[in-house]
Image (spheres, rainbow, N blue to C red):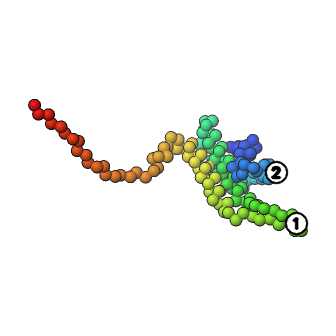
Amino acid sequence: MALITVDDFPAVRAAINIELDEVGLPDSIIALPIYLGAADSAVKQQDPLWNTRSSSELRHLKNAVIYFTAARILVSLPRVTSEAFGQRYSYKIDQVSTGELASSLQTFGDDEINAVINPGVDETLEQPITFSLAQVCRPYRRRWWS
């Protein structure tokens, strides 16, 4: 049983590009074992207790599968920036590395899994602790002489 269904495929497309539709990325491509199957297996491998999770935890795991699937598909998609239909068909492909975007999606997926496996971990605890010296202040003492 996969964690996501065909109903979740629009979210996979939106993770890649919000303008991407079923014509640009068909359901049959998303459902391929090298994309959805691999992403689903990766999440289940990281959380062996996936089938016992509550609905909110399960939503995080589904989000992770969506992000992982999108990351796997993204590196395969050409990023066409312009097309010309003059005497000969020509096109330009964006030279920007899709690896950076795929890496970001992978990180989003990891964050979703961590929300289930390590719930309540405060991100501020991962910030480095710094120490500094405080100025020593001597309070003004007033002596009352009677």
The amino acid type, in three-letter code, at marker 2 is Val
Q: Position of residue 57 (x, y in %)?
A: 60, 39
Residue sitting at the far left: 146
- 10 Å crowding of disc 1: few (<14), some (14-19), many (20+): few
Tag 1 or tag 2, which sits nearer the N-term? 2
Label 1 sits on residue:
86
Instruction: Tell me the CA gap for discs 2 and 1.
Output: 24 Å
Q: How many marks?
A: 2
- Looking at the picture, tell me which residue is in the foreground, 141 or 11: 141
- Looking at the picture, tell me which residue is in the foreground, 91 or 57: 91
Residue 78 is tagged as none
Label 2 sits on residue:
23
* Residue found at x 59% / y 42%: 49
Residue sitting at the far right: 87
* Residue found at x 66% / y 48%: 65
The quarter of the picture where the N terminus appears is: top right
Q: Is residue 36 visible?
A: no
Query: The residue tagged with tag 1: helix, strand or loop?
Result: loop
- 10 Å crowding of disc 2: few (<14), some (14-19), many (20+): few
* Residue found at x 31% / y 52%: 133
The quarter of the picture where the C terminus appears is: top left
* Residue found at x 57% / y 42%: 116
Q: Position of residue 64 (x, y in %)?
A: 63, 47
Query: The residue tagged with tag 2: helix, strand or loop?
Result: loop
The amino acid type, in three-letter code, at marker 1 is Gly
Q: Position of residue 51 (x, y in %)?
A: 63, 40
